[in-house]
């Protein structure tokens, strides 16, 4: 295995997935016209979770997800999750915290539409969850990122859960 190429690939993969999270955040906030129309944006006063949770859920967990559709706390947790996981992945910081949080977010989204449409069990959310966990164990924040500097900071050494 070529270590330098692997290092660069981990960095590019981490940054790419971070951009996916960050794009979802900006599209939902501003309604950039891809997944979210401008008149359906969070800035227009529309809940970023209501549409999917109330109408896009299916399967055994659908009633649970439908019951929290449009809840302000759920909206804020979801949007902060997209933003913070995206920024952390792009910068390569707080990989442990953002990796576990992002994997949990992906599992929750996967569970909202279980079973997936094109496979009995797997969809992109499960693959993203595995990648997020891989980034933690591979120290991918150090690959084209600020992970090493982050881990050496005095605050992070005192509060290792922020790694």
Image (tube, grey):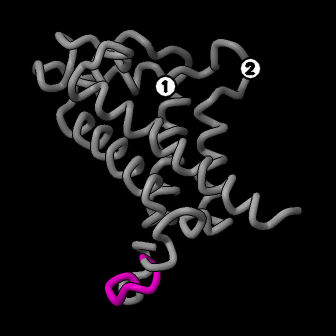
With 81 as the anchor, is 37 left or right in this view? left
SS class of the residue under badge 1?
A: helix
Image coords of residue 85 (percent x, y): 41, 50
Crowding at label 1, few (<14), some or many (≥20) Cα neighbours within 10 Å? many
Whether residue 154 appears in magenta in the rendering, the answer is yes
Image coords of residue 41 (percent x, y): 20, 20
- The residue at 29%/38% (across/down) is 79
Image coords of residue 36 (percent x, y): 31, 16
Q: Is residue 58 placed above or below 26 in the rendered structure?
A: above
SS class of the residue under badge 2?
A: loop
Q: Is there CB contact under 8 Å for labels 1 and 2?
A: no
Image coords of residue 25 (percent x, y): 32, 34
Give the residues drawn in magenta, as a range.
150-156
With 79 as the anchor, is 131 left or right in this view? right
Crowding at label 2, few (<14), some or many (≥20) Cα neighbours within 10 Å? few
Considering depth in this image, is 141 or 107 the residue closer to the camera? 141
- The residue at 46%/16% (across/down) is 57
Mark 1 or 2 closer to N-term? 1
Res 31 quadrant in image: top left
With 69 as the anchor, is 61 left or right in this view? right
Q: Tell me the residue that label 2 is attached to.
A: 120
Considering depth in this image, is 56 or 66 the residue closer to the camera? 56
Q: Tell me the residue that label 1 is attached to.
A: 112
């Amino acid at each position: 295995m070529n270590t330098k190429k692997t290092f660069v690939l981990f960095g590019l993969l981490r940054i790419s997935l971070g951009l996916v999270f960050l794009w979802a955040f900006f599209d939902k906030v501003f309604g950039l016209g891809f997944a979210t129309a401008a008149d359906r944006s969070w800035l227009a006063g529309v809940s970023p979770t209501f549409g999917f949770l109330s109408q896009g859920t299916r399967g055994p967990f659908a009633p649970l997800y439908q019951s929290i559709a449009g809840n302000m706390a759920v909206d804020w947790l979801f949007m902060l999750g997209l933003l913070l996981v995206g920024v952390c992945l792009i910068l390569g910081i707080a990989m442990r915290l953002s990796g576990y949080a992002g994997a949990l977010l992906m599992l929750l989204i996967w569970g909202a539409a279980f079973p997936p449409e094109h496979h009995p069990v797997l969809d992109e959310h499960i693959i993203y969850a595995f990648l997020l966990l891989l980034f933690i164990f591979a120290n991918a924040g150090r690959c084209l990122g600020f992970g090493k500097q982050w881990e050496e900071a005095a605050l992070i050494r005192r509060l290792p859960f922020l790694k």
